[in-house]
Image (tube, rainbow, N blue to C red):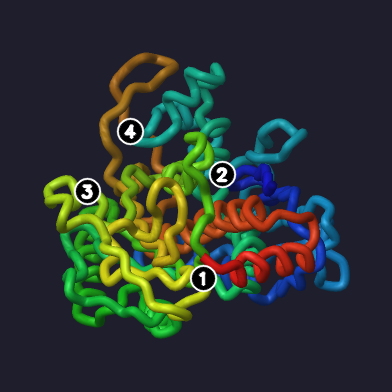
Amino acid sequence: MLTYLTAGESHGPQLTAIIDGFPSGLQISLEQLNFQLSRRQKGYGRGGRMKIETDQAEILSGIRNSFTMGSPITLAVKNADYANWTKIMHPINPIADDLNLKEQRLAYETSTPRPGHADLAGGIKLNHKDFRNILERASARETAIRVAIGSLARQFLEHFDIQIASHVVSIGTANLPDDIKIDNIDELRKITEDSEVRCIDKATEEKYIAVIKDAKKKRDSLGGVAEVIVTGLPVGLGGFSQPEQRLDSLLAAAIMAIPSVKGFEMGAGFKSAAMLGSDVHDEIFYAKDSNQKKKDFYRKTNNAGGVEGGMTNGENLVLRAAAKPISTLNKPLKTVDVKTKEPAEAMVERTDNCVVPAMGVVCEAAVALVLANSFIGKFGSDNLAEIKQNYQNYLKTSY
């Protein structure tokens, strides 16, 4: 089974990840890996940090001559901004004496926690009153390395013609109309890659940009909802026997672990709570040789979002993640200085106004990691050749 660990701070030297359990024999494209990193950096509403960084992954172990070896894979993404933070963030040297005024603020004015961030809870937990020790790791900058290892999982899934895409369905009060849908995942990808806000509708895209501009003018931030779609999944990934086997539970955990995400739903999601059972549940039909991955069963609706009883049912996986507005504001909120216990204004770091388009890309990576792990668990082996054989045998088995 796949296990991974990430490390690194937002303004430290680099982000690092080790992923273990990855099968041998898969050809890895570094170009595709870096393409996924570049997608995460895009989006209207992103801040100045993305003008500094050009994220590129470095492969340090586990891949030789572009093929996975079956040993732990180590990836690193350098932080270009570390050059501007070395005096403050050096792993060994104390904070330098020759800081300019801006650097002094960033180094020392770190005891006024931001509402909505990890600052205060993390400081109390780890006994830090210098919240730099919390915010550096709690930062969403960590998602860059998660996207990198998610790209490995994605390339594994694509080997079996499982495709992943995302698009933004709301930003602030602006929403994509329910009747606007794109069923072809290749077309959806093309349109969203050309959109500044990863939107499939031009008129709605303009509304998204307008509300972001308005929030920026007010020195405020905006959240929203991104939808992830996965096609080509076979029936039976996940399980129902134990809670930790249920695929929807695993997906929810992975999505909710992304910074700023406060809501998760699959298929009809919360809307299904107000519907009758006869309207919610997807009726089952059968047509011989209709689709081998579905075992010839199909649905005309997909309110379940592709998962029933904790397992994939052969329909597209559809899930949504709701992100709150990010908690660093250029119009700081009220807080308390934890050193003096006096009222204060919250810390201000370099910030984005809206990260929802980028959040969708991070969600894709998180979903890829869960699905790759479930796929290996179902068709398990430590090498790609055996996994392919097991998978083909499963598809050929009559039911």
Mark 3 or 1: in front is: 1
Label whose residue precedes the other's in the sequence (1 or 4) = 4
Which residue is at 49% across, 58% downward? 362
Q: Amino acid at mark 4?
A: Pro
Q: Position of residue 281 (x, y in %)?
A: 24, 56
The Cα atoms of the two marked residues, 4 and 2, are separated by 27 Å
4 sits left or right of 327 in the view: right
Q: Which residue is mark 3?
A: 270
Query: Which circle, 1 or 4, is nearer the viewer?
Result: 1
Would you say 391 lies left or right of 121 here? right
**Amino acid under disc 3:** Phe
Q: Nearer the viewer, residue 21 or 295?
A: 295
Q: Are marks 1 and 2 in contact (CB under 8 Å)?
A: no
Q: Based on the displayed image, in which of its 4 quarters is residue 144 positioned?
A: bottom right
Work out whether mark 4 precedes mark 2 in sequence or the reverse, and give the earlier one. 2
Q: Residue at point 51% right, 19% down? A: 125
Picture coordinates of residue 274, whole percent (x, y): 12, 48
Residue carrying label 2: 100
Q: Could you tell me which secondary element the residue under label 2 belongs to?
A: loop
Q: Is residue 55 visible?
A: no
Quarter of the rendering containing residue 119: top left
Residue position for label 1: 293
Cβ atoms at labels 4 and 3 below 8 Å apart? no
